[in-house]
Amino acid sequence: MASESHDQLHFVLIPLTSPGHLIPMADMAKLLAQHGLVVTIITTPLNAIGIKPIIDRGIDSGLSLHLVQFSLPLAEYGLPEGCETMESVPARNLFRNFFDAVIRLQQPVELT
């Protein structure tokens, strides 16, 4: 990985948890890192699986990329285990719960 200094610009990207947002965001992260920026993508563990190969290839080529994972508080919002993407929400009436769970990620992100 390229050496990182405190005066380097650091982008933190938090894509919506949907493949249509995650994959382009991973590509954008690589483009930013190719221009000398430090880039961190924050997502959930299940979503990280899909973009980890893209990020790993970038890291292997010397780019300053990071992948940080936070778990959604699924049970707290009445969502089943593994419900980490919009496509996995089992019923339309649970979309609000899903977005509320995603919004709850703000606190651990701000503390990091």
Image (tube, rainbow, N blue to C red):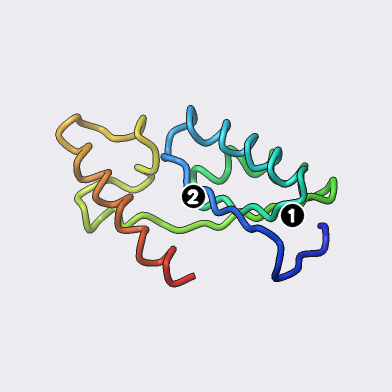
Give the x, y percent position of residue 20: 48, 27
Left or right placement of residue 94 versus residue 33 in this view: left
Asked if disc 2 and disc 1 are in contact, CB closer than 8 Å, the reply is no
Q: Residue at x 29, y 35 (%)?
A: 89
Residue visible at 30% across and 58% down? 104
Q: Is residue 32 above or below residue 38?
A: above
Nearest-to-viewer mark from 2 and 1: 1
Amino acid type, mark 2? Thr
CA distance for labels 2 and 1:
17 Å
111 on left or right of 31 = left
Quadrant the N terminus occupies: bottom right
Horizontal and vertical percent position of residue 105 = 36, 58
x 85%, y 45%: residue: 61
Side of 6 where 25 appears, left or right: left
Q: Secondary structure at mark 2?
A: strand
The residue that disc 2 covers is: 43
- Residue drawn at 33 percent across, 50 percent down: 102
The residue lying toward the viewer, choosing from 39 and 59, is: 39
Question: Residue 96 at x, y = what percent?
Answer: 19, 41
Please state the horizontal and vertical placement of residue 30, each as a whole percent of the image: 70, 40
Q: Which mark is residue 64?
A: 1
Give the secondary structure at mark 1.
loop
Q: Is residue 51 above or below residue 3?
A: above
User: Counting other residues with Cα less than 10 Å from the Cα at mark 2, is it few (<14), some (14-19), or many (20 or more)?
Assistant: many
For marks 2 and 1 on the same chain, the one whose residue lies earlier in the sequence: 2
Give whichever of 101, 37 is nearer the camera: 37
Q: Answer left or right for 9 relative to 101.
A: right
Q: Amino acid at mark 1?
A: Ser
Dot 1: few (<14), some (14–19), or many (≥20) neighbours within 10 Å?
many
- Report the residue that reaches farthest toward the left: 93
